[in-house]
Image: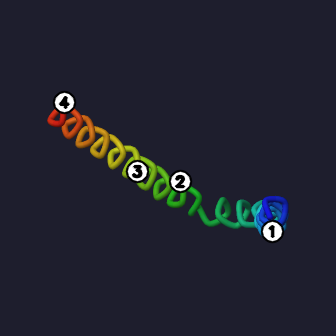
Amino acid sequence: MKNYLTYLLFSLLVPVFANAQGLDNLLRSNGRIYVVIGVILIIFIGIILYLIRIERKINKLEKQNH
């Protein structure tokens, strides 16, 4: 089952990576690559802040239980 899932994931991702070069050229020619990078950074920073907040809440709950 694990090999099947690995094969399925690989077969789904290969066309995405093969087409990424063309998409990259399109985004660079239109100047939209900076928008994409900006959105990715905003999402990444949001995830990091969310994880820090959850970690603080967990630490607070652990201190209350001990």
- Comparing labels 2 and 1, the label whose residue is closer to the camera: 1
The tag on residue 37 is 2
| Helix, strand or loop for disc 3 | helix
Q: Position of residue 55 (x, y in %)?
A: 31, 40
The tag on residue 8 is 1
Tell me which numbered mark, 1 or 4, is placed earlier along the sequence.
1
The residue to which callout 4 is attached is 66
Q: Residue at x 30, y 46 (%)?
A: 54
Tell me which numbered mark, 3 or 1, is placed earlier along the sequence.
1
Q: Are marks 3 and 4 in contact (CB under 8 Å)?
A: no
Q: Are marks 4 and 2 in contact (CB under 8 Å)?
A: no
Marks 2/1: CA–CA distance:
28 Å
- The three-letter amino acid code for the residue at tag 4 is His
Q: Are marks 1 and 4 in contact (CB under 8 Å)?
A: no
Q: Position of residue 26 (x, y in %)?
A: 70, 67
Tell me which numbered mark, 4 or 2, is placed earlier along the sequence.
2
- The three-letter amino acid code for the residue at tag 1 is Leu
Q: Is residue 61 above or below residue 15?
A: above
| Helix, strand or loop for disc 1 | helix
Q: Is residue 18 left or right of residue 43?
A: right
The residue to which callout 3 is attached is 47
Marks 1/4: CA–CA distance:
46 Å
- Comparing labels 1 and 4, the label whose residue is closer to the camera: 4
* Of residues 59 and 38, the one drawn nearer to the viewer in this rendering: 59
| Dot 1 crowding, Cα within 10 Å, few <14, some 14–19, many 20+ | few
| Helix, strand or loop for disc 2 | helix
**Residue 11 showing in the rendered view:** yes
Determine the residue located farthest toward the left in the rendered image: 64
